[in-house]
Image (tube, grey):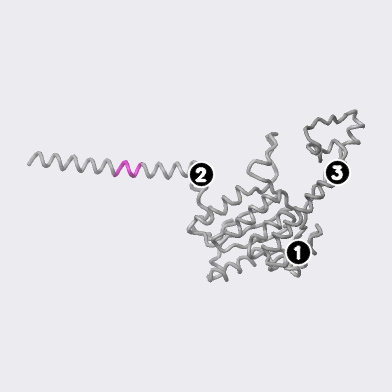
Amino acid sequence: MTSLRHIARYAFLALVVIAVFSVCLWIYGAWHDEWSGYNASIAVSDGFCNIAIIPIVGDFIPFAGADQDGSGNTPPPSTNPDDTLAALRAAEADPNIRGILVRIDSSGGSPVAAEVIANGLKHASLPLVALIREMGVSAAYLAATGAKTIIASPFSDIGSIGVTMSYIDNTAQNVKEGLQYIPLTSAKFKDYGDPNKLLTADERALLERDLKIYHTQFVKEVAENRSLPVEQVAKLADGSSMPGALALENKLIDALGDQETARAWFAEQLNMPLEEVVFCE
């Protein structure tokens, strides 16, 4: 009998130890996640907001870290597809998030980055709207077309469908400073476009050939994303931008407005009261 009581006591103590250990482990895990920022890195909602905001600002760069110049200075705001798609996936994985607002203020940059972002937005699993506030031109506009609905301020700058390879010719300045360019290449066009040498007629023809190819692709993707005839987009693709109101007339956007306009859009899409649409600012 005494032996059974000892066994029961040891079993009870073992259960207490296991329970205390489990609680301590849970407390440590929660503390570590909070301290390390782990929770913040995977959770988009604070438990109250339900519309994620993904900012697209500054120059478009091809990948994360591409804007680091090694100077140690804080780089200007920029957008890269790696970070944007990661934010998109995080929003989709958060059960408290019911929609995504892509907020755009950018003059463009890398067309490849824009294409990747546009394709990511097209395949979003949640209701998604793009809001162009100050500017959404060139590559930034291409990225915006990935959203099925684009809202823009009437004072915004929209479009600028086109590609540029323009650069500053340094040859006159180099001559003035006594600098001489020494060409050493294994192929005729290996150093074409170098600003320290004059551009030959053959090199210009090569660059203009590529520009036409890129321009045609840009027009094609905008037309597909916006469900517009290629011919219609081609007429607008002279490189110029336009105010939001004119962009609406030309069907480059779907509505004029601001973030409150987007709130009303989400309320309708999600069939919920307007006051229950809360942005994760």
Amino acid type, callout 1: Val
Q: Main secondary structure of the magenta part?
A: helix
Q: Pick whichever of labels 1 and 2 is earlier in the sequence.
A: 2
Q: Pick whichever of labels 3 and 2 is earlier in the sequence.
A: 2
Q: CA distance from mark 1 to mark 2?
A: 45 Å
Q: Which mark is residue 59?
A: none
Residue at 60% of width from left, 47% of height from top?
Answer: 82
Look at the image and tell me in which quarter the N terminus lies: top left
Tag nearer the camera, 3 or 2: 3
Marks 1 and 3: in contact by CB < 8 Å? no
206 or 132, which is in the foreground?
A: 206
Q: Which residue is mark 1?
A: 233
Q: Position of residue 90 (x, y in %)?
A: 53, 52
Q: CA distance from mark 3 to mark 1?
A: 30 Å
Q: Position of residue 275 (x, y in %)?
A: 55, 68
Residue at 8% of width from left, 39% of height from top?
Answer: 2
* Left-right relation of 215 to 275: right
140 or 190, which is in the foreground?
A: 190
Q: Which mark is residue 37?
A: 2
Residue at 83% of width from left, 38% of height from top?
Answer: 195
Q: What's drawn in magenta, residue-wise?
A: 19-24
Amino acid type, callout 2: Gly
Q: Is disc 2 surrounded by few (<14), some (14 to 19) or many (20+) residues within 10 Å?
A: few
Q: Which residue is mark 3?
A: 202
Tag nearer the camera, 3 or 1: 3
